[in-house]
Image (cartoon, grey):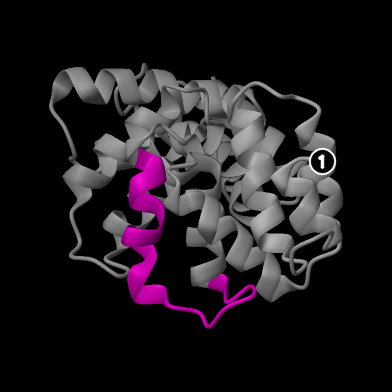
């Protein structure tokens, strides 16, 4: 019987579900795919506090997914006392290892000055890294960051490409933002019909700002 199973069942050692989770994770890293189902089964039996302890143990081993999960738990108070000032610390290690969600969250923390000094240029860097992995929400935020002045002309061009990608994948706020770019001619040819098309897509998903902008276009009768 493996060490993970011993801790999971309490056979010969005191039962310790978080420790079992850790050793199943070690087995997974070693290529034993069958450990995944066992680890999931152990996780289902845990209290929120045990889940936090388990993921923290594995995060300290360097697992980027559990580093991110620990950051989320610290922020939300899931299984532990919420520690919002630790937002960057919670997501930073996972972000450095390429976790797209962690990179987005770190970018948001930096952009808004939550738990760290506000730094929109550094935020844009993390949004870009997440966006380049195909994270559609990060693509939107990267576009917004560059539109507001983070990065040079080359970065602004790339950000508009990503902003459109995000809109094309159905992110409502991205549809609104790209519609605004089209309506204003910011970095793309001014095209009111194209703006209306994006506003209409977002309005159909019950976005009030999109519906308002679409109405304003029709009222002004500026459609191409």
- Is residue 6 covered in magenta? no
**Which quarter of the picture shows residue 190?**
top left
Residue located farthest toward the front when viewing the structure as drawn: 12
**Which residue is denoted by mark 1 in the rendering?**
1
**Which quarter of the picture shows residue 149?**
top left
- Is residue 94 covered in magenta? yes
Residue located farthest toward the left when viewing the structure as drawn: 152
Q: Which residue is pictured at 27% across the width and 56% down the height?
A: 110
Whether 9 is drawn above or below 181: the answer is: below
Whether 208 is drawn above or below 39: the answer is: below
In this rendered view, identify the residue nearer to me: 158 or 21: 21
**Which quarter of the picture shows residue 69?**
bottom right
Main SS class of the magenta portion in the image: helix
Residues rendered magenta in the picture: 76-95
Residue 171 visible (yes or no): no
In this rendered view, identify the residue nearer to me: 224 or 94: 94
Quadrant into which the N terminus falls: top right
């Amino acid at each position: 019987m493996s060490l993970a199973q011993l801790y999971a069942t309490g056979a010969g050692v005191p039962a310790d579900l978080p420790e079992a989770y850790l050793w199943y994770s070690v087995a997974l890293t070693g290529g034993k795919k069958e450990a995944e189902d066992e680890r999931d089964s152990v996780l289902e039996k845990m209290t929120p506090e045990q889940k936090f302890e388990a993921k923290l143990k594995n995060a300290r081993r360097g697992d980027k997914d559990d580093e991110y999960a620990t950051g989320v738990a610290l922020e939300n108070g899931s299984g532990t006392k919420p520690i919002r000032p630790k937002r960057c610390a919670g997501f930073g290690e996972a972000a450095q290892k390429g976790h797209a969600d962690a990179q987005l969250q770190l970018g948001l923390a930096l952009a808004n000055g939550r738990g760290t000094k506000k730094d929109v240029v550094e935020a844009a860097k993390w949004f870009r890294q997440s966006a380049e992995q195909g994270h559609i929400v990060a693509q939107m935020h990267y576009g917004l960051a560059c539109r507001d002045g983070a990065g040079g002309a080359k970065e602004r061009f790339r950000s508009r490409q990503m902003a459109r990608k995000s809109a094309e994948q159905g992110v409502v706020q991205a549809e609104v933002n790209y519609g605004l770019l089209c309506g204003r001619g910011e970095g793309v040819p001014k095209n009111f019909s194209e703006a209306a098309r994006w506003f209409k897509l977002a309005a159909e998903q019950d976005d009030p700002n999109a519906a308002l902008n679409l109405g304003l276009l029709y009222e002004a009768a500026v459609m191409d």
